[in-house]
Amino acid sequence: MREAVGWITVERASVIVAALALLGIFYSWRSAQAAKASADAALSQAASAREQVDLGRQQIELLLRQIAQTEEAQQATRQAQQEALQPMVVVDIVPAPNDRSVMMLVIENIGPSIARNVRIDVSPPPARSFDRADGKQMHEWHIFTQGIKTMPPGHRMEFLFDIGFQRFKPDVPTDFTFVVDAEGPFGPAPQLTFDIDLNALRESWIGQTTIGKVVEQMEKGNRNLSELTSAVRQLNPDVRGAQRSSRQEALAELEAAE
C-alpha cells in the first residue's frame, strides 16, 4: 500500500486526471453523437409522419372531389332525365296552311308530358291591325290574362293573329317576345323565351291564293264596273234611243205572241 501511495507522484496524478478527463470527453462526445443520431432519426420519423399525413390528406381531398364529381354527374343525369320528361310549350306566328296571307298564332306542347298552368307573357302587348278600339283587344284574351290550365302532349292551339298585308303597315309592331312558364310532372318546367320578328318573313306572306289578292281582284272589278257605267252614261242619245226602240219592239213581239 505504501508502495502504491509512493508510486503516485504529482506528475503521475496529473497524467491520470488528464486521461480520465479525455475519457470523459470521449464518452460525452459519443453520447452527443448518439443523441444527435437519435434526434436526426426522430426528425426523420417526424418528417416521414408529416409526409404520410399530407399524403393521406391529399388522398382524402381527391376522394372528396371524386365523390362531389360523381354526385354532380348523377345530379346532371337526373336533371337531364327530368327535363327530357318535362312539357315544352312553344309559341310561334306562322302562315295559315290554306292562305299564306293569314297570320296564325300557334301555341303547342311538343313535350312528352302534360303541361299545367301555362302562362304566356308577351311584349309589347299584342294587337291586331283590324281590332276595333272599343272591342276586346288581343292582349285581353284569356290565354294571356288567365293562362291555359292543361295542355296534353301534342295539343295545338291556333288563333287568327292578323292579315299579312295589314300587319306591315307603318307604325304596326312586328317584333314580339313571348315568355312561357309551365308546370310538369317534376314541378316548374324550364322557362322558354321566343323572340319573333315578322319583318324577316315579310315577303313570305304572299301566296298564290290570298285574301290580299281577293281584295285586289274585288277592287279591280269595282274599277272596271265604274268605268263601264261611265261609258254607258256617255253614249249619245241616238244610241240610247235605238236601245229603247229595240227593247220596245221586243216587248211588242212578246205581247203579240201571247
Image: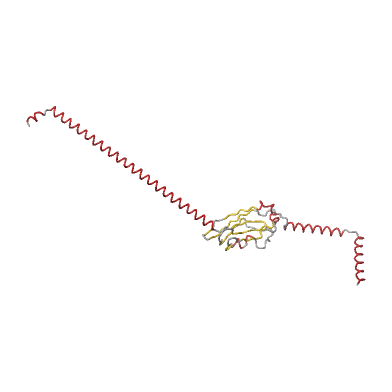
Residue 65's x, y, as percent? 43, 49
Residue 107's x, y, as percent? 61, 59
Tell me if residue 3 comes above or below residue 81 in the rendering. Answer: above
Quadrant of the image containing the C terminus: bottom right
For the image shown, how many numbered marks are present on the structure? 0
Q: Quadrant of residue 11?
A: top left
Residue 172's x, y, as percent? 67, 55
Coloring applied to the structure = secondary structure
In this orientation, which residue lies closer to the viewer: 76 or 252?
76
Q: In the image, 245: left or right of 181?
A: right
Residue furthest left as drawn: 2
In this orientation, which residue lies closer to the viewer: 150 or 218?
150
Q: Quadrant of residue 53?
A: top left
Residue furthest top as drawn: 11
Residue 240's x, y, as percent? 90, 61
Tell me if residue 240 comes above or below residue 4 in the rendering. Answer: below
Quadrant of the image containing the N terminus: top left
Residue furthest bottom as drawn: 258
Q: In the image, 251: left or right of 107?
A: right
Q: Quadrant of residue 90?
A: bottom right
